[in-house]
């Protein structure tokens, strides 16, 4: 299963990068034209076995003023920090297109738990300092993080870390090529409907 999954990830990411290259140009121009700032958003994330890597996405939020530091995670329906172009990219999950590079490098997979920053800086920061302290972390960290997964499709977007990891660990315990294919097809359907920013359960 692991070798087949990696072969699929590498091949699909390589083909995807080639086929999506015109979209990269369109999205990059649109992002830059809107506010004349950087096109990509890079952030350190936890990968397999806790290894840190830099994920790359198209930037969807306004750049914070100097001295303010990066934006904190806040789940609201109409986040004023999101750019006009960013709102379109987020609803279709096309902001994550550059993560095909992370998949090609072996840092991510198409399907798996979402890669998260090590430090927790949302409302749960009073309970946990890092995701390593959340019950269930060590099981989910046994596999490569993914673009999509069981949690992203079936759980509410603002679910807490502990319950999020429960969904992730159900996936880890039941990994199979057929399950991955099912989750990819469901993810494509959500993207076509523009429902990735929906806060509730998507299915």
Image (cartoon, rainbow, N blue to C red):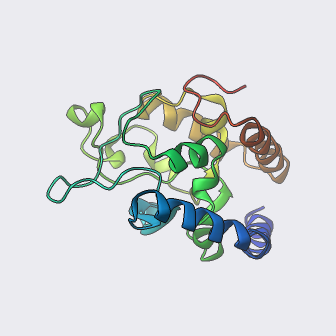
Query: Which residue is depicted at the point 60% across and 73% down?
Result: 101
Q: Is residue 170 left or right of residue 67?
A: right
- Name the one closer to the observer, 33 or 166: 33
Query: Which residue is depicted at the point 65% across and 75% down?
Result: 104
Query: Which residue is depicted at the point 58% across and 34% down?
Result: 167
Residue 199 on image: x %, y %: 54, 26
User: Is 11 located above or below residue 154 in the figure?
Assistant: below
User: Quadrant where the C terminus lies?
Assistant: top right
- Name the one closer to the observer, 164 or 185: 185
Q: Is residue 152 left or right of residue 132?
A: right
- Name the one closer to the observer, 165 or 19: 19
- Name the one closer to the observer, 10 or 56: 56
Residue projecting furthest to the top? 200
Whether residue 101 is visible to the viewer of this picture, yes or no, is yes
User: Is 48 located above or below residue 74 in the figure?
Assistant: below
Query: Which residue is depicted at the point 35% across and 40% down?
Result: 73
Residue projecting furthest to the left? 67
Residue projecting furthest to the right? 178
Residue 168 on image: x %, y %: 58, 41
Whether residue 170 is visible to the viewer of this picture, yes or no, is no
User: Quadrant where the N terminus lies?
Assistant: bottom right
Residue 188 occupies which quadrant of the picture? top right
User: Is 190 located above or below residue 97 in the figure?
Assistant: above
Q: Is residue 138 left or right of residue 172?
A: left
Residue 135 on image: x %, y %: 40, 37
């Amino acid at each position: 299963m692991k070798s087949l999954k990696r072969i699929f990830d590498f091949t699909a990411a390589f083909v995807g990068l080639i086929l999506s290259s015109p979209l990269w140009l369109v999205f990059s121009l649109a992002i830059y034209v809107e506010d004349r700032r950087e096109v990509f958003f890079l952030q350190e994330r936890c990968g397999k076995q806790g290894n840190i890597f830099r994920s790359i996405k198209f930037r969807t939020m306004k750049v914070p003023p100097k001295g303010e530091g990066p934006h904190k995670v806040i789940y609201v329906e109409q986040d004023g920090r999101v750019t006009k172009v960013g709102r379109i990219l987020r609803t279709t999950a096309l902001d994550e297109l550059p993560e095909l590079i992370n998949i090609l490098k072996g840092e991510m997979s198409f399907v798996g738990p979402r890669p998260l920053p090590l430090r927790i800086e949302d409302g749960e920061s009073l309970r946990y300092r890092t995701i390593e302290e959340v019950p269930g972390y060590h099981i989910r960290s046994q596999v490569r993080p993914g673009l999509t997964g069981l949690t992203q499709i079936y759980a509410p977007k603002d679910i807490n870390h502990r319950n999020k990891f429960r969904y992730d660990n159900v996936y880890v315990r039941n990994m199979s090529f057929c399950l991955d294919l099912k989750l990819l097809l469901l993810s494509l359907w959500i993207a076509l409907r523009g429902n990735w920013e929906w806060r509730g359960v998507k299915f």
